[in-house]
Image (tube, helix red, strand yellow):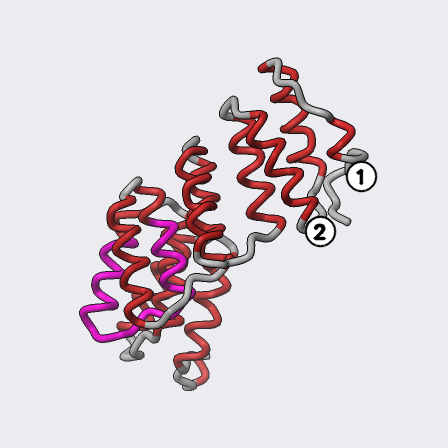
Amino acid sequence: MEDKGIKPQSRHWNAVLVACSKASETAAAIQIFKAMVENGEKPTVISYGALLSALEKGKLYDEAFKVWNHMIKVGIEPNLHAYTIMASVLTGQGKFNLLDTLFKEMASKGVEPSVVTYNAVISVCARNGLSGEAYEWFGRMRGEKVEANEITYEVLIEALADDGKPRLAYELHLKAQGEGLKLSAKPYDAVVRAAESYGASIDVNLLGPRPDKEKRG
């Protein structure tokens, strides 16, 4: 583009940044962001969001925190996407006090956390073996009247089952079914496996037939 004397515009930089972020190409996203600034282009909330996402995927939490603080410092208001990524970052760092503060800030700015925001927190908790915290945030989500989806239940059920809580995992599976959600075979298998491993008495028949492969529906 620049070879032809055409100066890339903000949306072009952002398109590349978002593509890098989606592909989990953290190093490339950092380079693109730096090149964007060096070319005199002012990053937008989309630019910062894509960079934060790439850093979070690369587990570069400290760097993400610095980028977040710089974004605030230059006066760019975070959107829901940026807040959601930062929620993942703080959860990954185990900074639940700062996560609470972040959610309070969202409320004060009128930005409502979505199911994606809560799923991000629950997923990172689950990935880090923090099933208790994941379940706590599930409760908080319900308290805020945010409807859980298949991802919420699947991640939480597997985390609880793997953490030796088959009964709770089983009850959540029944709850998801009661809400009309179609879960994949993974949480079903996790519940059955955990019940067998820990000698929990559950009625597998209530879970219905095992879903086909990993496909929902």
The residue drawn where x is 30% and y is 51% is 99
The residue drawn where x is 40% and y is 53% is 26
Say what amino acid the circle numbered 1 marks. Asp
Count of number-bearing discs: 2
Q: CA distance from mark 2 to mark 1?
A: 17 Å
The x and y percentages for residue 149 are 60, 53
Q: Is residue 132 above or below residue 16?
A: above
Left-right relation of 151 to 184: left
Q: Which residue is mark 1?
A: 212
Q: Residue furthest left?
A: 73
**Image quadrant assignment for residue 124:** top left
Magenta region: which residues? 64-89
The x and y percentages for residue 144 are 44, 57
Q: Is residue 42 above or below residue 134?
A: below
Q: Which residue is mark 2?
A: 180
| SS under mark 2 | loop
Local packing at callout 1 (Cα closer than 10 Å; few below 14, some 14-19, many 20+) is few
Q: Is residue 100 above or below residue 136?
A: below
| Nearest the eye: 73 or 137 | 137
